Amino acid sequence: MASSLIQAQSISLLLQQKSKASSLHTPTLFFSDQRRFRYTHTWPVKSMKKRPVIVAAISEELDKIKVITEETTVKRKLRAVLTVRRKLKEDIKDAIANNLDALSDMIGRNVVLELISTQFDPETRNPIRSGEVAIKDWCKKRNGNKGERVVYSVEFMVDSAFGEPGAVTVLNRHQKEFFLESIVVEGQGVMWSPVHFACDSWIQSEKDLASKRIFFSNKPYLPSETPPGLRALREKELSDLRGDGTGVRKLSDRIYDYALYNDLGNPDKGLEFVRPTAGGEKMPYPRRCRTGRHPTDTNMYAESRLEKPHPIYVPRDEVFEELKQGAFSAGRLRAVLHTLIPSLIANISADTHSFQGFHHIDNLYKEGLKLKLGLQEHLFNKIPLVQKIQESSEGMLRYDTPRILSKDKFAWLRDDEFARQMVAGINPVNIDRVKVFPPVSQLDQDMYGPPESAITEEHITCHLNGLTVQQAIDEGKLFVLDYHDIYLPFVDRINALEGRKTYGTRTIFFLGPSGTLKPIAIELGLPPSQPGGPRPSKVLTPPCDATSNWLWMLAKAHVSSNDAGVHQLVNHWYTLQQPVSFIQLVNHWLRTHAVMEPFILAAHRQLSAMHPVYKLLHPHTRYTLEINALARQSLINAEGVIESCFTPGPYCMEMSAAYYRQFWRFDQESLPADLIRRGVAVEDPTKPHGLRLLIDDYPYANDGLLLWSEIQTWVNSYVSLYYPDSAQIRSDTELQSWYWESIHVGHADLNNAPWWPPLSTPTDLASILSTLIWLASAQHAALNFGQYPLGGYVPSRPPLLRRLLPDENTNEYAEFLADPHRFFLGAMPGVLEATKFMAVVDTLSTHSPDEEYLGEDWSKNAVLWTSDKRAVRLQREFAASVSRAEKDISKWNSDPARRNRCGAGVLPYELLAPSSSPGVTCRGVPNSISI
């Protein structure tokens, strides 16, 4: 403050000296609310035309005009410090580009910065700019610094009226892009603290991007609060990110736009590679990131494909960083090596090779792919390369032992473990309470026959501990996995595929006095042979002899296979009364990856980086667009991993789309709403989290409610900082545009659904944001990071099956009776399918070294997130609460009363324990869908 007064007095003295010649009144010093000084001066009317610069005018009897003359302007020195992250590995192209950049520096083609004030010039109505300054020693510093980061500094001379910098523009006149981490601007004799700019962005050469990049300071502003000098820049930056919806996207672009899923097939390769477009009236689906690639030659509505190793477009800053890319590439190399030898076998032999015994599966973990299947010798004679590969890469060819085998190798054979997986396994989000018995189908009766399930009271009464069926229902003791309706319409088409057999399944569970579940009936349904006719269903109950035991094992395998698929395509990449291999597929891909992408695209297109909601959401969007693009390229595409390894095969995406159309609802995606919808919880204000679970020991729900509660508290508190009332929600143009576009463009096929939550109050906003953060973090983690540890042993959770249960009095039944062990393994995936599946889920279960986890304390780097100390304090409290939740989870895993997570041979449930080290750990909740 003292230096400001001295400067003010100096300028006042200069103005007094000028006033003697101009007969002016004495200048007066005022202070603004920000404690910056300003100067106003009264001028005679005749002198008005002669003043050099007019800043503002205030009039009583005469105009009082705040001015700064050229003679009296005080220049101030500001310094900007840039932190640039180097590439860890540089190739020959990088070396050439570095030499070209050095020459560019010599001829004045440098990296150029310009500061932009939060204020604007009232005469020109333009932002006040510092003028451009080039970094002169770029290449010298880069070449002289071998560390991971290089720090550069530049100095600006600005007028005292410049005010506080609110934005920085950067122009890269070099040949090579560079990664700008941050900029800090500070100055002497200024009334503002150092200003931080979190960049974390690739700065393209002007040959790829002619316009300057714009970065805003870490101060959050609602649109209505944007400082005058930044308003036009705020809209320009959003306009640049939206693009114009035309053209083929270059890898260097940073444009976020929407497209249909019309790039999964490749009709130019043949009819077997044709796939329907996901998205639109015929096959509703969320939208994905637009690439603008040209159509195929044979179908103008299908987008041409880019196959590996060619990168598929996502906006440049969404691409994996080097640490993540390195970990992902290493995983892909392991996957290639793991499947190489089985692929070679498949190429030289027409037979589909099965595992000859359980010990051959065990050898995958003990010895690697020795493939002692009675085939090795003649294969080595045909392909000597195979022996060399095994000799030189044996360590890479060996699979890690899945965690599911670590405490009890034979646990997967038991019914209690089969049931435990439904509440503490990879896909614990499908079990529903039985409300009506027998279960009833909602399918068209004219096509699929009578709606009632084939499971009757006679099948299950003896397993209810003396209760009647109605008593068990009334007491909340009966539960169901119902995959009948979503699967049955596809069963005939799937079973016509070579090496694929499936049913529409229902499984009834009983909750016993110990708090654990047991399966008491499995229905295996097939479509009627004639429309509307009876369905040829089988109902199996717990075994009583050797034959029924093997058939019961096969029935459980079909349920697990259905679960694996729905987990992967709906939940991971949802469920209510649908089948299980596919359920895993539905739960994973659709319910997290696919439904989140439109919200992410809309956030970049409609929310400025200065918007507080963008600042809250951004950590939960990291890498999602990139991993989704890679999935379109290799996982969910025609003959990709999902089609190759899971029962539905080429109908995977059609089934996912059917689920999206019939069952997915955003308003039921929060954890409490989902538990209530499935009937496994009821509202109870006397209980923690306001819910009472019908299955007290439900590890996914127990741990999930802990994290959901902390997320909700954190988001509610954060929202209240910026939106004290509903009027500000309704008047926030960016916020409303983001939500509208997410629904009406990103989820356009369901935009007229009545269940979309309104966005009119702070409570509405907090609920929407909490759901999105839950889906991106905890929900995805629960469905993803157990895939290999809990599902990598194929017999316990086969991703596909190749045989139906044999009918009595058939040759197949005689074959089964003669050698049930061989029949069971013959129903499992072949060696190629199994090893490919294991290799892929191993990669997908891996945490990268640069993972960012839910509840990490950001306070050390808070300036790179926000300057709002209130938000920093709330985030620190959130981090502490998540840490306490992790301790509670650890304590529950040691509680013998919780038999679904503690006991002899029972694995602890850690998928929702927030922290993790890198690798396959079966725990850890990243902030975002990053794998």
Image (cartoon, grey):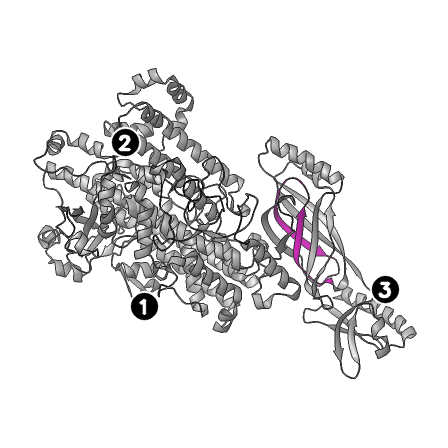
Q: Is residue 172 magenta?
A: yes
In-image side of 33 versus 415 (left or right): right
Residue 698 image position (x, y, % from top left): 28, 53
Q: Amino acid at mark 3?
A: Glu
Q: Nearer the viewer, residue 6 or 361?
A: 361
Quadrant, the C terminus: top left
Number of the front mark, 3 or 1: 3
Which residues are drawn in magenta? 162-191
Q: How many angstroms separate mark 1 from mark 2 (CA)?
A: 51 Å
Find numbered disc 2 in the image and state the secondary structure of the residue it sits on. Answer: loop
Quick check: can you spot residue 748?
Answer: yes
Q: Please state which of residues 366 and 52 is positioned toward the viewer in this rendering.
A: 52
Q: Which residue is mark 1?
A: 685
Assign a secondary structure to mark 1. loop
Single out the mark in the foreground, 1 or 2: 2
Could you tell me residue 122's position as x and y percent? 72, 68
Residue projecting furthest to the bottom: 61
Query: Mark 2 is on which residue type?
Result: Gly
Query: Is residue 920 shown to the viewer in this render?
Result: no
* 580 to 164, vertically: above or below: above
Kindly report the distance in space between the C-alpha atoms of the residues bearing marks 2 and 3.
Answer: 86 Å
Within 10 Å of disc 2 (Cα), the crowding (few <14, some 14-19, many 20+) is many
Q: Which residue carries the number 3 mark?
A: 71
* Disc 2 target residue: 830
In which quadrant will I find the N terminus?
bottom right
In this picture, residue 270 sits left or right of residue 554? right
First along the sequence among labels 2 and 3: 3
Of badges 2 and 3, the one in the foreground is 2
- Residue, x 66% and y 39% (percent of image)? 175
Q: Secondary structure at mark 3?
A: loop
